[in-house]
Amino acid sequence: MFESLSDRLQTVFQKLGSKGVLTEEDVREGMKQVRIALLEADVNYKVVKNFVALVTEQAIGEEVMKSLTPSQQVVKIVHQELINLLGEKNEPLLEARPGPTIIMLVGLQGTGKTTLAAKLGLYLRKQKSKRVMLVACDVYRPAAITQLETLGKQLGIPVYSEGTDARPPDIARRAIEKARQDLVNVVIIDTAGRLQIDERLMEELEQIDATVQTTERLLVVDAMTGQEAVKVADAFNQRINLSGLVMSKMDGDARGGAALSVRAVTGVPIKFLSTGEKIDSNTLEPFHPDRLASRILGMGDVLSLIERAEQIYDAEQAKAMEKKLRKGKFDFEDFLNAMHQMRKLGPFQQILGMIPGFGKVVQAMEENPDMMPEKHLKRVEAMVCSMTIEERRNPPIIKGSRRERIARGSGTSLEEVNALLKQFQQMQRMMKQMTGGKVGKSGRGKKGGRGGGGGGQIDPRDLMGMLR
């Protein structure tokens, strides 16, 4: 997301940084390029005008122009103004006391409301330990009801449905009654959409809202529609007083104009970013203005990456792994498990994009498919999966004929299998160093490395760092 805008802005700031001392003319020229970049990213014209004016006024101030690193000061100003533009701070979901908390999802047809209902339900159950119920109120599309019921069954989340004959406000009211009986904490109502805004749609949403007294009214906005998304958000907000926005399909939006405009135009906070149609913990993330501003400026997003790692971290698994490492027993089964853990963090390019300074690396990978890490990891996984259990647990037995069989079974070459085994041996030596084990005759690693001779903790995140 934001690839085009991020590239343009980084180019502007690199040019300013190469000048050393900045003049007012340099700053104004740089801001002109920033303005063009924002407009090309489909950011609202008035938003761009105000943003550039604020940054320019601060950037040509005496404090910046006479500083030792004026270009860095300009970037700092842009970063802060982006945060201000996006909403300054994270806005968590409101919570009703006493419950249940009632969340109504609204939006036009095709924005991904039904998928978002399932994603949000999973997020609230896993991250907030809430008992969730989904409610099917899109009575005009039987496929939407079926889809919600299917997703609910897959996730183990109950779905309240009355088919297509009842009125949506009545369905919502009876769903809340059922939720109270079942001690449900959060009710998520999936409402109908239209191809365009119409009076009937708005009246129905107003009736549902009045009937069940919703806690949150979240508009699901298709980020790929740019300025149209801003107009839609403004129209919905005028009728049903939105409490928050969810930007869907963010992975398909290289420009980012909608996300950068919608808060400034409507005053409604963005609460979540959604990517893809897959229902898992990596495709829905709470919106943090400071983190997104950092991503846009190529500064990475380490905090979000850490949070993802913490979600998949298993303390018991880490302890078991530590015991094996101390005995020098790290094998290909552990290697395969670490790969699977790393995959749970999300697509590899996305992970790299969260690490400061890796933006250009990700761009180079996207321009050259042969460099894509996912492709390489799949070949590695195929080789490991082609090994017998005995071979995975005891890699030294993998000699000539075994290596040839693994290459045939995985659709790779003998050279690739040999390279993998060599890399694995090197990794094992690193593990011994980290845990205070002996390495070879030289004695390297006896007391060194992390943990000072075996006192450190090892968890899957450490392994992921070495696999990368």
Image (tube, helix red, strand yellow):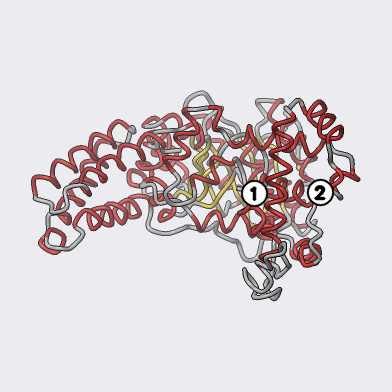
* Residue at the spot 76% in from the left edge and 42% down from the top edge: 159
From the viewer's side, name the closer residue of 315 and 164.
315
From the viewer's side, name the closer residue of 82 and 464.
464
SS label for mark 2? helix
Say which quarter of the image contains residue 137: top right
Instruction: Name the disc covering residue 312, or none.
Output: none
Residue at mark 2 to residue at mark 1: CA–CA distance: 14 Å
From the viewer's side, name the closer residue of 269 and 260.
260
* Residue at the spot 41% in from the left edge and 40% down from the top edge: 360
Residue 17 image offset from top left, x and y in percent = 22, 49
Q: Is residue 379 above or below residue 444?
A: above
Name, please, the residue furthest toward the right: 390
Q: Which residue is mark 1?
A: 467
Instruction: Name the disc covering residue 333, or none.
Output: 2
SS label for mark 1? helix
* Residue at the spot 16% in from the left edge and 48% down from the top edge: 19
Amino acid found under the numbered disc labelled 2: Glu
For the image, the number of numbered tags is 2
* Residue at the spot 63% in from the left edge and 71% down from the top edge: 448
Residue 460 placement, left or right of 249? right
Amino acid found under the numbered disc labelled 1: Leu
Residue 165 image offset from top left, x and y in percent = 73, 29
Residue 372 image offset from top left, x and y in percent = 56, 33
Query: Do the residues under discs 2 and 1 have CB atoms within 8 angstroms?
Result: no
Say which quarter of the image contains residue 128: bottom right
